[in-house]
Amino acid sequence: MFGDSDFYLSEKLKLESFCAYQDRCIFDVKKKLKSSLLSEEKKEQLIAELIQAKFIDDERFALSFAQGKQHIKKWGISKIKAGLKAKQISTILIDKALKTIDKTVYLEDLTLLIEKKKRLLSNEKESYKKEAKIIRYLLSKGYQLDDIFKCGIRED
């Protein structure tokens, strides 16, 4: 019995450290706990304790995920949304996180990505091929087609 308690505490300390390093969601913690030898009941208890102590907060995670991916990785809304869905974040929290994205900065980032890609493809002779490559690149980054056209993808 004493060994079980020590093991539980050691797992709890590991997870607290894991969650303190950067924001984590419940999905990340459950994934980390899969390899643990704790019983399912103890795993659920541990997750509940981490939520209670604010080590895990899906809302905080969703907000920081959206902000980080948009500012650092320059992801578009579609890719951020897909990333949050993959982490099993609720639709309500996804919508809340996406509302925090500053549309002006978002469109400025998109414009910069378009210009950067145009420079990289300056050797492309046919403008329609160049445009198609840029659009494919931006769609893969998660930007929406209407935003891409709003930011001036067309060659003058």
Image: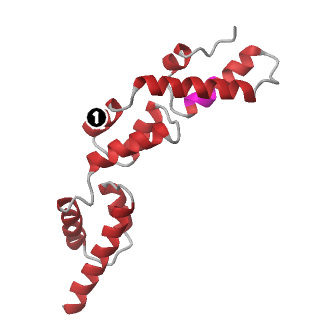
* Kind of element beneath mark 1: helix
Relative side of 49 to 151, left or right = left
Relative side of 137 to 69, left or right = right
Q: Quadrant of residue 125?
A: top right
Tell me what residue is drawn at x 50 percent, y 19 percent.
147
Q: Is the residue 117 above or below the residue 20 in the image?
A: above
Mainly helix, strand or loop, the magenta region? helix
Relative side of 19 to 51, left or right = right
Q: Is residue 82 magenta?
A: no
Q: Is the residue 89 above or below the residue 76 in the image?
A: below
- Reading the image, the residue beneath label 1 is 96
Relative side of 109 to 13, left or right = right
> What amino acid does circle 1 point to?
Lys
Tell me what residue is drawn at x 20 percent, y 71 percent.
41
Q: Which residues are magenta?
A: 135-139
Q: Quadrant of residue 68?
A: top left
